[in-house]
Amino acid sequence: MAAELGLIINEAKCELICDDSEAVNQFQEVVPSVVNVSCDASDGSPIGSACIDAVLMQKLDEFKRLQHTD
């Protein structure tokens, strides 16, 4: 379906940011070369709810740190 929309995915550059092993296994059935990155080790943007809280908390901590000027 992606090709029909003109979207070409470079599988060699794809990362799956997810800690749910079942979801990772299902995704790797479709895209076997995808690299799985845990939520804690990621600095990217997750799609879906699996890591949203962890990523948002990390970003919030970064903003708080930037806000404090001593």
Image: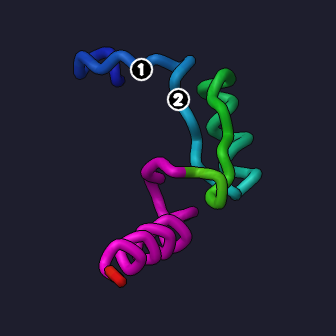
The location of residue 57, given as percent across then percent down, is: 48, 75
Tell me the colour scheme of the image. rainbow
Measure the C-alpha gap from mark 2 to mark 1: 8 Å
**Residue type highlighted by circle 2:** Cys
Quarter-of-image position of residue 59: bottom left
Residue at 56%, 18% in the rendered image:
12
Pick out the residue farthest to the left: 5
What is the number of the mark on residue 1?
none
Q: Is residue 33 above or below residue 37?
A: above
- From what the image shows, is residue 33 above or below residue 55? above
Q: For residue 61: magenta?
A: yes
Mark 2 — residue? 14
State the residue in front, 33 or 5: 33
Q: Is residue 41 above or below residue 51?
A: above
* Range of magenta residues: 43-67
Residue 52 in percent (x, y) is at 48, 66
Mark 2 or 1, nearer chain start: 1
* Image quarter in which the N terminus is found: top left
Judge left or right: residue 56 versus residue 22.
left
SS assignment at label 1: loop
- Mark 2 Cα shell of 10 Å, populated few (<14), some (14-19), many (≥20): few
As drawn, is 3 to the left or to the right of 31? left
Q: Are marks 2 and 1 in contact (CB under 8 Å)?
A: yes
Closest to the camera, between mark 2 and mark 1, is 2
* Local secondary structure at mark 2: loop
**Amino acid type at image mark 1:** Ile
What is the number of the mark on residue 9?
1
Question: Can you tell which quarter of the image residue 65 is in?
Answer: bottom left
- The residue that appears at 55% across and 63% down in the rendered structure is 51
Q: Quadrant of residue 63?
A: bottom left
Q: How packed is label 1: few (under 14 Cα within 10 Å), some, or many (20 or more)? A: few
Q: Kindly report the secondary structure that dominates the magenta region of the rendered protein.
A: helix
